[in-house]
Image (cartoon, rainbow, N blue to C red):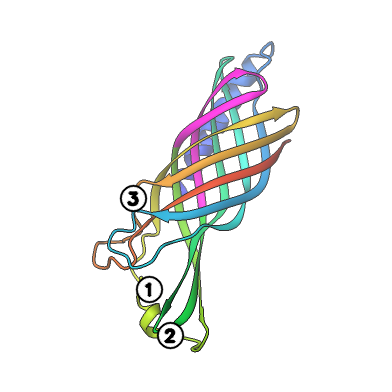
Amino acid sequence: MKKIFILIAAITLMASNISAQDNDSSEKLHLGLKIGVNVSNVYDTQGQQFTADAKAGLAAGAFLSIPIGKYLGVQPEILFSQKGYQTSNSILGFGYKYTHTANFIDVPLLFAFKPIPLITILAGPEYSFLISETNAFTNTIFSDPLIQKSDFDNSNVRKNTLGFVFGGDVNLGNIVIGARAGWDILNNNGDGTQTTPRYKNVYYQGTIGFRL
């Protein structure tokens, strides 16, 4: 985690020096803040006995736009990002609902292509660190139905994972409207000793940001 922040700081310092040496350039270094929503779900649920539905969560953080010439750039970001899924079913005629919320720190390192000033196309890898999880399990009869709940427990979840992000920004002066799609490359199973439930996160993200 520390290496990620050191890398971002080094890129920022280098870009600041480049920008200072090029006073005539119309492209400038921009720091910004943004907030929005994730609509997340899971995929690659091999061997699981449930069908996952999407759920909404918070996405908020900061971004840094670093120009590399007129049309290209790099955009590292750091975000608090809620992901997860929900499902409902029944057993022995009794219905239940399960909601899984995972709180991540996401650090995407996005490569930017700017065909026109209004549009920025972004794509690149994403490092995610799991900071906490919340599981809400309810049914119509029992407060803690152990038979069903065991299908969702995983004490060996992966804390660090890698993913890929693709999307774009609409630049309206200092206002930035962003849309992203992101998905995990690695599944949530830690060292391979437990596979219930096995899945990968996928999400769609919409945000509104402000360049400082």
Figure quadrant of residue 169 = top right
- Kind of residue at disc 1: Asp
Residue tagged by mark 3?
A: 186
According to the picture, the residue beneath numbered tag 1 turns out to be: 153
Q: Is residue 1 visible?
A: no
- Cα–Cα span, label 1 and label 3: 19 Å
| Quarter of the view holding residue 159 | bottom left
Q: Residue at x 58, y 51 (%)?
A: 38
- At label 3, the amino acid type is Leu
Position of 84 with respect to 150 (left or right) is: right
State the residue at coordinates (62%, 51%).
37
| Region in magenta | 105-124
Which numbered disc covers residue 145?
2
Residue at 54 percent of width and 36 percent of height: 76
Residue displayed at 52% across by 38% down: 8
Where does the image place residue 166, in percent across and percent down from the top left?
49, 35
Please state which of residues 139 and 67 is positioned toward the viewer in this rendering.
Answer: 139
Q: Are marks 3 and 2 in contact (CB under 8 Å)?
A: no
